[in-house]
C-alpha cells in the first residue's frame, strides 16, 4: 500500500512540475485553444457554418472552462518573458493592470455565457463583446 501511495504521489508531483515547468508553452496552448473556440463562433457569425444555438452555448461553456485554466501567477512567473513568447514586458511591469484586464475579460465572458446568442446577429454582437475583452490584454500586454 505504501508503494502505491508513493507511486501515485510521485506521478502527481511529476505532472505538477511538468505543468509549471514551461509556463510559456502552457499559456500558448491555452490561448491557441481559446482562439480556435472563438474562431468557430466567428465562422458561424459570418455564415460560413450554419448557426446552431446549442453549439454556441456549448462553445461558450468551453471558453469559460478555458478561462478557468488561467492562473496568472503560474502562467506568467517572473522570467517567463524570455523565449518564444508574445507576452510583452509590460505584463511584469504592471502585473496589477494585467490582472485587472484579465478580470474584465472574465466579467465579459460570464455575461456572454449567461445569455448565449440565439441568432446570427446576436452572435456577431457577442463576438464583438468578447473581442473587446480579449483586446484589453492583447492591445496592452501582447507584442505585435
Image: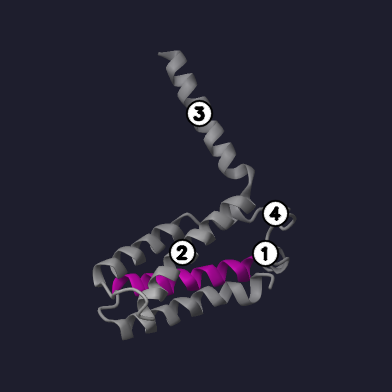
**Are the residues flagged by discs 1 and 3 in contact, CB closer than 8 Å?**
no
**Are the residues flagged by discs 2 and 3 in contact, CB closer than 8 Å?**
no
Tell me where residue 17 appears, x and y as whole percent.
59, 37
The boundaries of the magenta stretch are 95-115
Q: Residues within 10 Å of mark 4 (few under 14, many from 20)?
A: some
Q: Name the front one of labels 2 and 3.
A: 2
Where disc 2 sits, the SS reads: helix
Q: What residue do we see at 35% from left, 75% from top?
A: 44
| In front of the other: 71 or 129 | 129
The residue that label 1 is drawn on is 86
Where disc 4 sits, the SS reads: loop
- Give the quadrant of the C terminus: bottom right
Q: Name the front one of labels 1 and 3.
A: 1
Which of disc 3 and disc 2 is earlier in sequence? Answer: 3
The residue that label 4 is drawn on is 80
**Are the residues flagged by discs 3 and 4 in contact, CB closer than 8 Å?**
no
**Are the residues flagged by discs 2 and 1 in contact, CB closer than 8 Å?**
no
Which of disc 4 and disc 3 is earlier in sequence? Answer: 3
Q: What's the CA distance linking mark 2 and mark 3?
A: 30 Å
Q: Name the front one of labels 1 and 4.
A: 1
Where disc 3 sits, the SS reads: helix
Queried whether the magenta region covers residue 101, the answer comes back as yes
Q: What's the CA distance linking mark 3 and mark 4?
A: 25 Å
Q: What's the CA distance linking mark 1 and mark 4?
A: 11 Å
Q: What residue do we see at 29% from left, 74% from top?
A: 50
The residue that label 3 is drawn on is 11
- Give the quadrant of the N terminus: top left
Query: In this picture, is 19 found above or below 44?
Result: above
Amino acid at each position: 500500500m505504501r508503494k502505491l501511495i508513493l507511486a501515485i504521489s510521485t506521478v502527481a508531483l511529476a505532472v505538477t512540475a511538468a505543468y509549471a515547468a514551461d509556463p510559456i508553452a502552457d499559456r500558448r496552448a491555452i490561448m491557441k485553444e481559446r482562439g480556435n473556440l472563438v474562431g468557430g463562433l466567428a465562422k458561424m457569425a459570418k455564415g460560413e457554418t450554419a448557426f446552431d444555438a446549442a453549439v454556441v452555448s456549448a462553445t461558450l461553456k468551453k471558453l469559460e472552462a478555458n478561462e478557468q485554466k488561467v492562473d496568472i501567477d503560474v502562467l506568467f512567473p517572473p522570467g517567463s518573458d524570455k523565449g518564444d513568447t508574445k507576452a510583452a514586458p509590460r505584463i511584469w511591469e504592471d502585473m496589477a493592470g494585467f490582472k485587472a484586464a484579465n478580470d474584465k475579460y472574465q466579467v465579459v465572458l460570464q455575461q456572454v455565457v449567461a445569455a448565449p446568442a440565439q441568432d446570427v446577429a446576436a452572435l456577431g454582437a457577442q463576438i464583438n463583446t468578447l473581442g473587446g475583452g480579449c483586446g484589453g490584454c492583447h492591445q496592452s500586454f501582447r507584442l505585435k
